[in-house]
Amino acid sequence: MPPSTPSEVRVRAACPHDCPDTCAMEVTVADGRAVRIRGAADMPFTNGTLCTKVAHYLERVYSERRLLHPMKRVGRKGEGRFERISWDEALDTIAAKYREIAAEDPRAILPYSYCGTMGLVQGESLDRRFFHRLGASLLERTICATAGAHGWKATVGAMLGADPEAASEAGLILIWGANPVVSNLHGWRHLQEAKRRGARLVCIDPRRTDTAKKCDLHLAPLPGTDGALALAMMQVLIAEGLLDREYIARHTLGFDALAVRVRACTPEWAAPLTGLAAEAIRSLAIEYGRSARSLIRLNYGLNRCAGGGMAVRNVACLPALTGAWRHPGCGALLSTSGNFPVDVQALARPDLYPDARRFPPRALNMSFIGDVLLDSRDPPVRAIHVYNANPVAVAPDSRRVRAGFAREDLFCVVHEQFQTDTADYADILLPATSQLEHRDLHKAYGHPYVVDNRPAIAPLGEARSNTAVFRALARRLGFAAAALYESDDAIAAAAFRADDPRVAGLAEGLQARGWARLALPAGHAPFADGGFRTPSGKCEFFSAALAHEGLDPLPAWHPPAESVPSNPALGARYPLALITPPARNFLNSTFANQARFLADEGGPKLEIHPEDAVARGVVEGMRLRIHNDRGDFIARAVVTTDVRPGVVCSPSVWWPKLCEGGHNANAVIAARPTDMGGGPTFYDCLVEVEPA
Ligand SMILES: Nc1nc2c(c(=O)[nH]1)N[C@H]1C(S)=C(S)[C@@H](COP(=O)(O)OP(=O)(O)OC[C@H]3O[C@@H](n4cnc5c(=O)[nH]c(N)nc54)[C@H](O)[C@@H]3O)O[C@H]1N2
Ligand SMILES: Nc1nc2c(c(=O)[nH]1)N[C@H]1C(S)=C(S)[C@@H](COP(=O)(O)OP(=O)(O)OC[C@H]3O[C@@H](n4cnc5c(=O)[nH]c(N)nc54)[C@H](O)[C@@H]3O)O[C@H]1N2
Ligand SMILES: [Mo]
């Protein structure tokens, strides 16, 4: 690294984005301006590199399109016409409105946030405290991972798994519903290292992704059918005796019931459901059963279907059958987040809720925000405060979402860095700081490091951080609790439970380097000797907790809500299964307004198999209308065998207002909950396609 000139300073930062990799960054600042950003070379997981998106983060920070002062709406809702106002006017307007609504029933106010930043300070501290103190409705933050997390936790008890930095110890790696080349680049490095050392890589994904192309084997099940594939693998393992009987006897619960349950789930049973050859399923299961040192790297791709919770649960059973959990870097990994002893009570202070007897707390599900805003409920939502999120672009069933945000009687505050489609519906639009302009502290879901974020530059224009806004609102509402006014530094200092052995030495590490690994042994294997975090302490093939929720206690087959076999009437009209996984150059809808990334992506696309294309008179590059009863969107045809017949793929998430016709893929996706966890079903959607 070239030495910095005397006027330059280097500031330690963390990538704020919703990605498993949570990189440590180094920002060079000269005369108050950030001039360089790079991945921290000394942080092992980041390893000195940033993804293409964040390597250009300064273009985002200094973009001409940044919102730099508060505004109020002057046009119609959704039109996006605003007029500059002062912070005082903005905050007074919001406080007056919240006070008026809260006097009747504070639950008519709804916070709406997700992971614009993953920071513990700007993402889940003073915002939570403020809305708890106000007595607002609670938000169920389901839009990404709750289905899979529920299935995973029912089986192994916590969001813990194999150490990603030890993945090179595995001899067989199944990359399942994940595309690490695109969405977990720094984790991919360790999978490649395993390959160099002789491991076999198998990708299980309906689409031949950039990751699949680099694997030894690619299996392309139909979307939403992973649960059946995993059941059939279990059937083969049990029938062939490819089992670690000692591990099963000591560390699992319900094996006999599982064996009965899967007896009929042969590869021949699963073949027509998954669209895979029975022989391919059998040989995968046998290879898996014969490799004790195996790793299943899941991401959330398979949890975005009606049966997504059960699919993840079924997959999570596999390593306990073969005993793969015994070995470092082996077993399975969905998320490392359970390693971090976050003090959620201290951060969020649910105890500040004022009057639970008069206003019993009410929780509303973010994934179905259209229904939340439109269906009658008591009390109706009269105000919504959006920050760290872009629901008009990312939530399913856009027509309903828009109709909800367009309600004239809804008071809408949006706090944003850019004028998103959601911002267009704001009554008051507030400018937000970027990651370089505020303090934060980050855990991760793809590695075991804590990463610090120090402000590198002053806020641009009149931008304010989330915490600054909630402090100012608390003051205007006359709230007394000191917790509502804590400084960012104080919040960060108390974010983890200090008495937890995993944070030993954390503060010193952060101070010295800006990042610190949790005190976990290298190659830690959390379930090597059992110790599952379930009620029984075992890997629960049989889950009494699920039974208690009215769900099947055993692994089961939950078909997609929308597929030709599971819904033939719908399939007759809309025969193509649409998936809309992350585009490489976007991070959900973040970056999807920046010229560089829009140019790289080259406009909304629809990948379609040559057979399906010919049948519809579709040729390469043609403008297509993708539609069903819920709506439509326009994309260019990419005719390719990367998708199989019957499956189409449109990498996402585009800003609707930057798309021809004003809609993105969420216009056709249903607002329907998953089997567990109340998640959305983004990859469970039947459509028809025609030349536009
Ligand atoms: N570049 C980039 N990186 C990202 C994101 C982004 O938008 N862009 N998003 C971030 C976020 S919010 C998240 S949650 C994470 C993870 O985000 P995920 O949505 O889990 O995305 P991927 O890890 O890309 O894996 C999804 C893969 O699952 C496949 N898939 C779709 N349906 C099915 C199915 O039914 N079964 C199986 N087996 N596979 C299926 C898709 O084709 C895709 O390749 O990535 C994060 N990283
Ligand atoms: N069709 C389809 N839809 C999807 C998905 C898909 O695969 N397909 N993926 C889904 C998934 S996995 C997820 S996680 C969700 C993601 O949904 P969201 O969490 O809503 O993610 P983004 O679209 O990135 O929007 C985040 C917004 O927060 C803003 N922001 C960033 N930092 C700050 C800050 O410090 N303060 C404030 N106030 N704002 C800030 C950014 O400018 C950005 O506009 O989308 C889901 N939607
Ligand atoms: Mo996500």
Image (tube, helix red, strand yellow):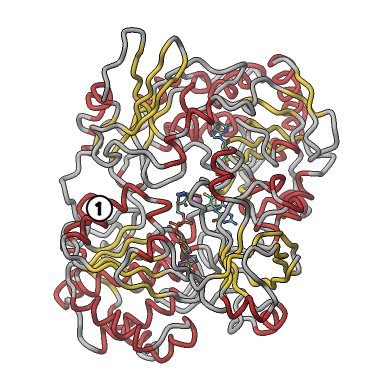
- The location of residue 443, given as percent across then percent down, is 36, 38
- The location of residue 327, given as percent across then percent down, is 16, 61
Residue 591: quadrant of the picture: top right
177 or 51, nearer to the observer: 51
Amino acid carrying label 1: it is: His
Count of marks placed on residues: 1
When the figure is inspected, residue 434 is found, relative to residue 184, above or below; the finding is above
- Residue in the picture at 19% in, 70% down: 323
- The location of residue 236, given as percent across then percent down, is 29, 86
| Any part of residue 532 in sight | yes
Residue 9: quadrant of the picture: top left
Mark 1: secondary structure: helix
- In the image, ligand 2 is in what quadrant? top right
- The location of residue 170, given as percent across then percent down, is 19, 62
473 or 352, nearer to the observer: 473
| Any part of residue 539 in sight | no
21 or 366, nearer to the observer: 21
When the figure is inspected, residue 114 is found, relative to residue 203, above or below; the finding is above
Residue 476: quadrant of the picture: top right
When the figure is inspected, residue 40 is found, relative to residue 138, above or below; the finding is above
- Residue in the picture at 76% in, 27% down: 97
| Residue, disc 1 | 190
